[in-house]
Image (cartoon, rainbow, N blue to C red):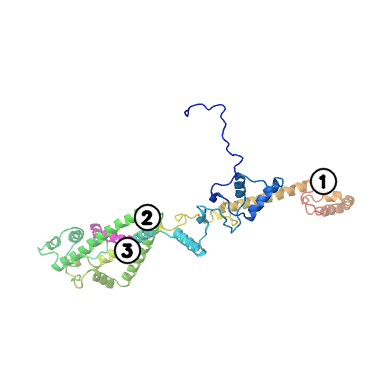
Amino acid sequence: MTDSSPTPPNRQDPQQDPPDDAEEPAFDWMKPGPATPAAAASDRAAGTGAGGSAEPLSRADRKAAEAAVEPAPGDTGSHFSEPLPTSALQIRPPEEEVQRRNAEREHALNAKPVAPRVMQVLLAVCFPVILLVLAVRAVASPLFLWVEYNRPGFPGDGYGFSTDDRMTYGSYAVDYLSNWAGPRYLGELINRSGDKLFGDGEVSHMADVKLVILSAFGAGILLILLSLIAVIYLRRRSPGGVRRGLFAGSIIALVIILSLGVLAVLGWEQFFAQFHNVFFASGTWTFSLQDTLIRLFPSQFWVDGGIVVAGLVLLASLVTLILTWPTRRRRGLPKRGAAVADPAGDDEATDATEAAPAKRSRFRRARAGKAAEATAGAGSEPDPAAGSPAAGSSATDGAGSGTSGSEGTGSAASGAADPGSPGTGSAGAPTRGYSSTV
């Protein structure tokens, strides 16, 4: 006989639950623990429900009864209870820990990044310096030199330089400040008489001026590059950061230029001397009136140059201040009176500009409704003088005597009759307006 052989038809199936089975567990650990009061009660209920006869229960019945009985609180029993995997989440931390976490969360939400603030400060510091450097570059140019020598009122040279000589020799000095030539560029120049145009002290001072000017131009270029980096970063990471940085920089530039202007106005000679002492050694920048530098660049030249520098910086700062002024639109806020939130907490907004016309329209509708009601009431109500016996007797009396009739009509209507025809009121015709009895 193999596995594929057919089953004989007279074969008896083995009994799965023989009658002599004691229904006892095969092992001790499978036996139930000591009966609890709840289990005993359930057993008694099961026994009484079956008609009072205590019949032995099967294994399935016992398991169902055990599952139906819940263990008492604090009674571990003999059954093993595994905790849920998420039971740790139900444990609330101490109140101090909760407050600390909430405080850290609020601080993280309200804290602003440091990098955008650093870039705004960098832009605000670089902006006034860049304006000063650009203004100095505009003054140290042949265009300004030509304007100064040809403007009316500029003092002439008392030692023989004409305007053309000043323009020619002065252009050499200005070009030397912005090129990369050495001191020979000025040291080998000669005048018409064949003498050296600039002395050794003048050439040495111009070399010092050139070092200061080129250093300022180099610093200006570096600050422009840093400002461009700050602008690009702020445009990507901080909306409105460029505007705030330029606004602060324009204020700083205004404060600096106004302070320097006040000092220059109060004492120009002292201001000029202190300015030169900052950048040059003492005694290297003073010359006689016959030296070429003094004849080309007199004191009036430096006064006009300072005015032009201050004017350019002031103008650029004011324009920047106006263009970056923090208006409500630039700050992303609604216009004043444009939207008024509902105090009850609703999300709907009411336009203040439309509220007044709406109120006026309601007032107009109310007045129009009252006027319509008044007109309808005056047209539908009869004259009280005709309906009341007293008024009728007054009208009859008025018919007998002409004077009495007009008085009766006047007493029946409170001035509603036509003033042009005082005696036309009749007892049956309605009058205009409201009657005196209403």
Our reading of the magenta stretch's main secondary structure is: helix
Q: Is residue 246 visible?
A: no
* Label 3 residue SS: helix
- Horizontal and vertical percent position of residue 353: 56, 53
Pointer 3 residue:
310
Instruction: Please tell me whether residue 86 belongs to the stretch shown in magenta.
Output: no
Q: Amino acid at mark 3?
A: Ala
* Label 2 residue SS: helix
Number of labelled discs? 3
- Horizontal and vertical percent position of residue 244: 40, 58
The label number, if any, that marks residue 234 in the structure image: 2
Instruction: Please tell me whether residue 137 belongs to the stretch shown in magenta.
Output: yes
- Horizontal and vertical percent position of residue 228: 32, 55
Pointer 1 residue:
429
Find the distance from the CA under tag 2 to the CA under tag 1.
Answer: 86 Å
Quarter where residue 154 is shown = bottom left
